[in-house]
Image (cartoon, rainbow, N blue to C red):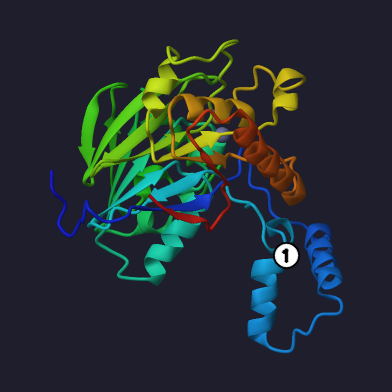
Amino acid sequence: MKIAGSRPDRLIPVRFWGTRGSLPTPLGHGAVRAKIRDALLAARGRRLATAEAIDGFIDRDLPFSVSGTFGGNTACVEIVTGGDEYLICDLGTGLREFGNHILAHGPAAPHCFNLFLSHMHWDHIMGFPFFTPAYIKGNRIRIHGCHKNLRAAMQGQQSSAYFPVRFEALGATIEFVELEPGAEYEVAGFTVTAFKQFHGGDSYGYRFSRGGKSIVYSTDCEHKEPVLDASYPFVEFFRNADLLIFDGMYSLADVVSVKEDWGHSSNIIGVELAQLAQVRRLVLFHHEPACDDAKIERVSGETIRYEEISRNGHKVEIVSAYDGLELAV
Ligand SMILES: [Zn+2]
Ligand SMILES: [Zn+2]
């Protein structure tokens, strides 16, 4: 299927609207104050007389944990199609920001949104009741997923005990599209394949391909194999991906101590799988709410060093996702 306006030869932008796992994690007063203090300490003795000089100082001289934040919204990633239809992975609270962006930059309707659900744990659907385009007549929303009870979960979230607006009362036309793991589908100019993952109640990853490029969205999965090698099915699924968005919620120390069987993986397993599959870029995603920006930055640095010392010819670039990150594939 050819989507009007799509340009398969061009770079594919990927926008991260929500990157936190489990529950939204806003910065508190103490964290903001600590960033201001650290920035002012770093600025002592410098000539920062103009806004340009200050911007340059922020961009070049402050660590990201001081100048920014890894994000408070839960999982939501947009693959920018360049065509008439939108493509979104998961409906965490980042979806609200995406909806507001659509309304701020164009007409309210008509739009067609293709939403892909990894699973229905709350952090992956809780943004939907706040997705304003869903309230607007003329918009079309297709919710894709492999679970049998997608509709019931989405309706249940908006039952009267939890939310004032019923799912059935939303103005947009909403369809549910049940996918079969392993089958290929054409959606918004991309070939899409789903695969089953290890997570309580099951979750599904998705591989999106177009024009020889592939993006894999694989969150909420616990890789527990004692030995990872090329025969591990995920290696084939991740094979040669240009971008692998990976649930690296925990550090390896967490996984082998208290958080085994919690349904998530570590940064180290992410690197090993990305190396085996010859992935170009690995994005650590679904950050643990208990981790502050300094901790996530530290784990990110350790992950980069681990990739360097364990590299066997093929380099994997490591990125830690944050709300507002945009990567081109
Ligand atoms: Zn999750
Ligand atoms: Zn989950």
User: Quick check: 324 left or right of 32?
Assistant: left
Q: Residue at x 72, y 18 (%)?
A: 256
Image spot of residue 114 (x, y percent): 31, 45
User: Quick check: 166 left or right of 226?
Assistant: left
Return the residue found at the far bottom: 49
Image spot of residue 87 (x, y percent): 33, 48
Q: Residue at x 65, y 22 (%)?
A: 262
Rendered position, 46 above or below 153: below
Image spot of residue 59 (x, y percent): 64, 69
Amino acid identity at mark 1: Leu
Image spot of residue 264 (x, y percent): 60, 26
Q: Nearer the viewer, residue 21 or 326?
A: 326
Rendered position, 311 above or below 110: above
Name which quarter of the figure residue 266 lies in. Answer: top right
* Disc 1 C-beta below 8 A from ligand 1: no
Query: Does the image show residue 146?
Result: no
Rendered position, 233 above or below 319: above
Q: Crowding at label 1, few (<14), some or many (≥20) Cα neighbours within 10 Å?
A: some
Per the image, label 1 sits on a secondary structure element best described as loop
Q: Residue at x 68, y 58 (%)?
A: 64
Q: Nearer the viewer, residue 164 or 126?
A: 126
Name which quarter of the figure residue 222 lies in. Answer: top right
User: Quick check: 28 left or right of 183?
Assistant: right
Q: Quadrant of ligand 1?
A: top right
Rendered position, 190 above or below 137: above
Q: Which residue is mark 1?
A: 62
Q: Quadrant of the N terminus?
A: top left
Query: Does the image show residue 82?
Result: yes
